Amino acid sequence: MTGPATGLYAWRRGSGLRPDGDEAARLLVADSWLVQDGASRGLDLHRARFTAGCAGTGEAKLSEVDSFWSAMLGLLPRRGDWFPRVELVSAADGHRLRLRVRPAPARTTEVAVWAGRGDPRAVPQRKGPDLDLLGGLRREAAEVGAGEALLTTPSGLVLESSQSGLLWWEDDTLCVPGPRLRVLPSVTVALIRRTAARQGITVAARRRRLADLAGREVWLANALHGIRPVSGWVGSTVEAGPSVRAPHWQRWWAAAAVALPRTPARPFEP
């Protein structure tokens, strides 16, 4: 690590990453992942999702995103637990690519989920614009004793949660929401699906309502917590199923981290 361990840094061509204090900038795209002693999971997928999000805004050139990404990797700490976030923001002087270096929050191995109130997101398939809104939903969930809020379509089809992708088991089939539903492309769900397919497990996309998940093993999955079985559906009469497969998959997730690329970074300049 060539600079301070925590902070917000903006990338500029020719000068690299420097401290940035503009918290009023509007968030257009974001991506984050867990780094543990210099190792992470699915970094190539996080890069692809962030790059696609930036391309979708029309605000940043792909060559610019590539240069930023290389500089960003060089600034990440290689010791301790961290939860960095890359951002594309709109500021008074134009768009800006930024890195937010943050200590990793506390992590949990299971989660109670509030049945929620639909899906208020404006841009559900791009991470960033709705993060403040989703944070508000999680605070509402916390008020009723839950860690996350379930997001559903107007007709009640399950999508994902306020912070995680959704998976569940129907007998020996691992299920995810139907392909035409508007969900955020989850890196963690993609890694689970890829591994399940390699193990010969059938993975199916299905359209289900919360009532259809009664008694089933349901997981929330994201880059911070990995795999968390749902321990209860708060605000609903639906009962959560037993966590039969989760312990095995949680051990797989713990062992899946790989070392960050050794990317030289421009020296930090305060």
Image: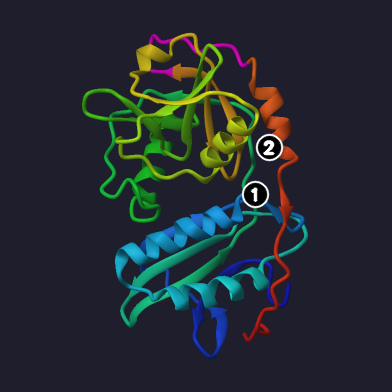
Q: Relative to residue 1, is residue 196 drawn left or right? A: left
Q: Locate the N terminus and report the quarter of the image it occupies.
A: bottom right
In the rendered image, the vertical position of residue 45 relative to residue 230, given as above or below: below
| 37 left or right, relative to 245 | right
Viewer-nearest residue: 76 or 188: 188
Residue ID at (29%, 50%):
123
SS at mark 2 in the image: helix
Asked if the residue at tag 1 contacts the one at tag 2, i.e. Cβ–Cβ closer than 8 Å, the answer is: yes
In the picture, the quarter occupied by the C terminus is bottom right
Residue plotted at (58% across, 57% down):
44
Give the residues in magenta. Answer: 234-243
Is 202 included in the stretch rendered in magenta? no
Check disc 1 and report the residue beneath it.
41
**Residue topped by disc 2:** 253
Residue 152's place in the image compared with 90, above or below, is: above
Which amino acid type corresponds to the residue marked 1 in the rendered image? Arg
- Residue 145 in view (yes/no): no
Q: Is residue 237 magenta?
A: yes
Q: Position of residue 203 (x, y in %)?
A: 50, 26
